[in-house]
Amino acid sequence: MTGRTHDLTSFTALSLTLVYTTIPDMSLATAVAALGACFIGGLAPDIDQPTADLYRRLPAGTVIARLVSPILGGHRFISHSLLGVLLFGWILKLLLVAMQSIILVDSGIIWTAFMIGYVAHLLVDMLTKEGVPWLFPIPFAFGIPPIQAMRIRTGEFIEKSVIFPSLLAYNNFSMCSIIPVFSGS
Ligand SMILES: [Zn+2]
């Protein structure tokens, strides 16, 4: 999937969480940081791809890409698996604990928002022909639908003309129910 679709998928996953769970009390700074963390989480699995949008948005991203992506074994390997979910979750937890005394936001909420974006990325990648190797290192990719020929190609018609607009439409509706929650009505 393209970076734009992953951004929107992460946002959709976060808004679904807000609609269907009890929203904890948080400061505005935490809410803004959580939104950013969710977007970063939504792009993070593709750090195994040198051309990923995440690198294009980072200063010196191409240099970092050349260093990081070979370590992860190429596109759709460990970062697109349950092992990757655990690894990234663990590393982020360590980072947040180390920064706890200097950041003024709720690190638990930031961590949760990042992981929502991360898992949403893997779920939506299952719609593509390559599928997702959830059980890496077992070399089997899972997809929706299971028949590979029925899945979509990244950046082609179905993604741009069906999936992206559908997510956009859903978010327009869901915003109507979330905004009153934040405004206290
Ligand atoms: Zn991906």
Image (cartoon, helix red, strand yellow):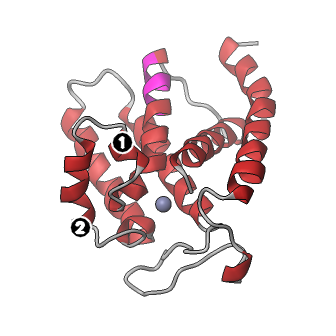
| Farthest-out residue, front | 156
Q: What kind of secondary structure does the magenta stretch mostly adopt?
A: helix
User: How far across and how far down the image is residue 142, in percent?
Assistant: 58, 78
Q: Residue at x 74, y 77 (%)?
A: 150
Q: For this rendering, which residue is in front, 43 or 26? A: 43
Q: Is residue 163 magenta?
A: no
Q: Residue at x 41, y 57 (%)?
A: 46
Picture layout, residue 2 above or below residue 39: below
Q: What residue span does the magenta drawing correspond to?
A: 29-34
Query: For the residues marked 2 and 1, what is the alpha-carbon distance in whole angstroms?
Result: 17 Å
Amino acid under label 1? Arg
Which residue is under mark 2?
A: 70
Amino acid under label 2? Pro
Q: Secondary structure at mark 1?
A: helix
Task: For label 2, count other residues whose C-alpha is less than 10 Å away and answer few (under 14), some (14-19) or many (20+).
Answer: some
Q: Sequence order check: which comes first, mark 2 or mark 1?
A: 1
Which residue is under mark 1?
A: 56
**Left or right: where 176 falls relative to 32:** right
**Left or right: where 50 falls relative to 4:** left
Q: Residue at x 70, y 81 (%)?
A: 149
Quadrant for residue 82, please give it.
Answer: bottom left
Task: For label 1, count other residues whose C-alpha is less than 10 Å away and answer few (under 14), some (14-19) or many (20+).
Answer: few
In contact (CB < 8 Å): disc 2 and disc 1: no
Picture layout, residue 112 above or below residue 87: above
